[in-house]
Amino acid sequence: DFEVLLAGTGRVVPVARGHSVVQALAAAGVVVPLSCGQGVCGTCQTRVLAGAPEHKDVFLTSAEREHGGFMPCVSRARGARLILDL
Ligand code: FES
């Protein structure tokens, strides 16, 4: 129900309701390292460059979130699009 734009390639990947950002990226052939899949371990961490994230992890501190930290195994977007540092 939102999309992510990958800053490195300009690709736009739709993220359907019920799918994680990591799952959507994998379906598009973009592999993000994954371990816990539950927002706990930190393995999948990337950065949001623009857009309003909806954080659902328990890994990042609020300071890390303010600096763009984003855990795509569980976190989502509040708006229509996030631009990720991928
Ligand atoms: Fe563990 Fe995302 S894979 S926090």
Image (cartoon, grey):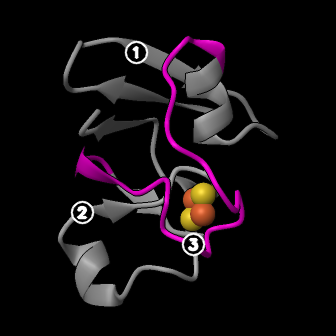
Q: Is residue 50 above or below residue 17?
A: below
Q: Nearer the viewer, mark 3 or mark 2?
A: 3
Q: Is mark 1 within 8 Å of ligand 1?
A: no
**Extent of the magenta region:** 27-51
Residue at point 71%, 28% (across, down): 16
Is residue 42 rendered to the left or right of residue 11?
A: right
Kindly indicate the quadrant of the structure image that contains residue 27. top right
Relative horizontal placement of residue 40, taking residue 44 as reference (left or right) = right
Secondary structure type for disc 2? loop
Residue 78 place in picture, x, y as percent: 49, 54
Q: Residue furthest right?
A: 18
Query: Which mark is in front, 1 or 3?
Result: 3
- Residue 69 picture location, percent across and down: 31, 65
Residue nearest the observer in this picture, 76 or 8: 8
Q: Is residue 46 left or right of residue 85?
A: right
Q: Measure how far apart labels 1 and 3 are at the Cα level.
A: 26 Å
